[in-house]
Amino acid sequence: MARRHLIGLLLAVEESWPTAFEAILGRLGPIRHGGETHEFPTERIVNEPFDLRARPAYGLVIVRLAWWYVVPREWLKKIALMDDVYLLNNPFTFQAMEKHSAYCAMMRLGLKVPETWLIPHKLPPENPRWATFAERYYPDFDLDEVAAQVGYPLFMKPFNGGAWVGVTKITNAGELHASYDASGERLMHLQAAVDDYDVFTRSLSIGPQTTVMRFDPSREWYDRYAPEEDFLAPDLNREVVTISRLVNAFFRWELNSCEVIVKDGEARPIDYANASPDLSLASLQYYFPWAISSLAAWCLFCCVRGRQMHVNQSTRDFFEVGDSELPYAEKLERYRALADDYFEVDAFEAFKAEALPHLTEVTIEYVESPEFDELVVHVARAEPPDVQETIIECARGRVADWVADQRAAVG
């Protein structure tokens, strides 16, 4: 009898990747590993009142909603603490996805994070005791002096932001004060800009699998990922991948993206805490099949292996490296080893070789099918009319390019 592993999808308004994920698992069917057969049904989770002692049926839950909404977050904490359900991502480190904690941790680990300051709210919180508190312990500060410490040009951005909301580039004092006045009750960072860079990258990591993409934030949202191979030198590519995996292993995140700017041969991480990284067909296009097949591979591995949820972080292991006098390159290799150990890289590769040798072939068959083309059209039709045909054309062409590259890679 096959062992059954129910995978829960905790979703917001996404449609493209859940549909593709369900289709890939359906086409894979049961798999064999270690002499046993395993089945992987899926279920889209609804948010309802829940009994804290109720036992869920899920073996694994893909977490996409809980950073934004409290009810699913508390349900995830319950099933992690009480029921050993495996989660992507850890809900107990979500606060670090407010950027600030992530910046602090990676600075201590020695990464080349640009100069960053946190500044108080422009508008204070509504609290009857605020005036007394502020008079005693909240002195006025010189915003221009802080900006001078950071250096122009700089970015003002919410400490808990996402999707570039509230982010402004600032080149002078006038822009600084206008942006601060407009920030209202948001708590903001000032961060030094990295201008005249060589490459802007966004890395998508799923478990121990990372793909580094050339990213252009100045282009339209559906045309920011350039399907280009080998745009980084091998050593820089390894460094960017290592940074991404380090962040994820440190915070126990297994579905995350990381933005790193490369300038003068140095990798400078600027944003690496994304509770819901981009998995959209409309934007990823070329990289979408890789993302879905990688997500399937990691979820199946975690279920079959009975991988345990790591609620607690092993921060001391990382800090011992970060606080040492080791050269930067040696620290990166130590971090890489810690991350590889956390993600069980060798066991994962062995699992794929035994249980999923046909995963790429199945993915190719799916993305070449009428079913997938219908998904492309459906996803595009949900966007503004003036970009729908462009998205359809780009998605079809770039996914076809991915298929061609996969076939070329195997001979």
Image: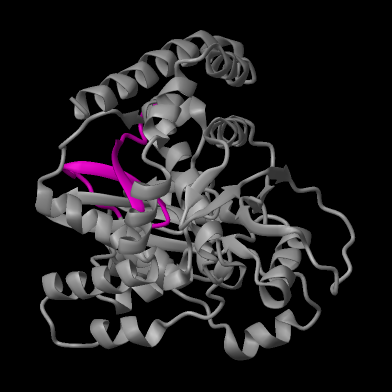
Q: Quadrant of residue 13?
A: top right
Q: Is residue 26 visible?
A: yes
Vertical comparison of 61 with 311: above or below:
above
Q: Position of residue 119 (x, y in %)?
A: 48, 69
Vertical comparison of 16 with 252: above or below:
above
Let me know if residue 209 is in the magenta part.
yes
Q: Which residues are magenta?
A: 193-219
Identify which residue, 259 or 71, lies in the foreground.
Answer: 71
Identify which residue, 151 or 198, lies in the foreground.
Answer: 198
Vertical comparison of 411 with 229: above or below:
above
Q: Position of residue 409 (x, y in %)?
A: 21, 29
Q: Position of residue 228 (x, y in %)?
A: 23, 30
Let me know if residue 179 is in the magenta part.
no
At a point 28% along the width and 88% down the height, the residue shown is 320
Vertical comparison of 109 with 35: above or below:
below
Identify which residue, 299 or 324, lies in the foreground.
Answer: 299
At a point 72% along the width and 69% down the height, the residue shown is 79
Q: Quadrant of the C terminus?
A: top left
User: In the image as oriented, which residue stretches furthest toward the bottom?
Assistant: 136
At a point 62% along the width and 15% down the height, the residue shown is 381
Q: Is residue 50 left or right of residue 65?
A: right
Q: Quadrant of residue 270?
A: bottom left
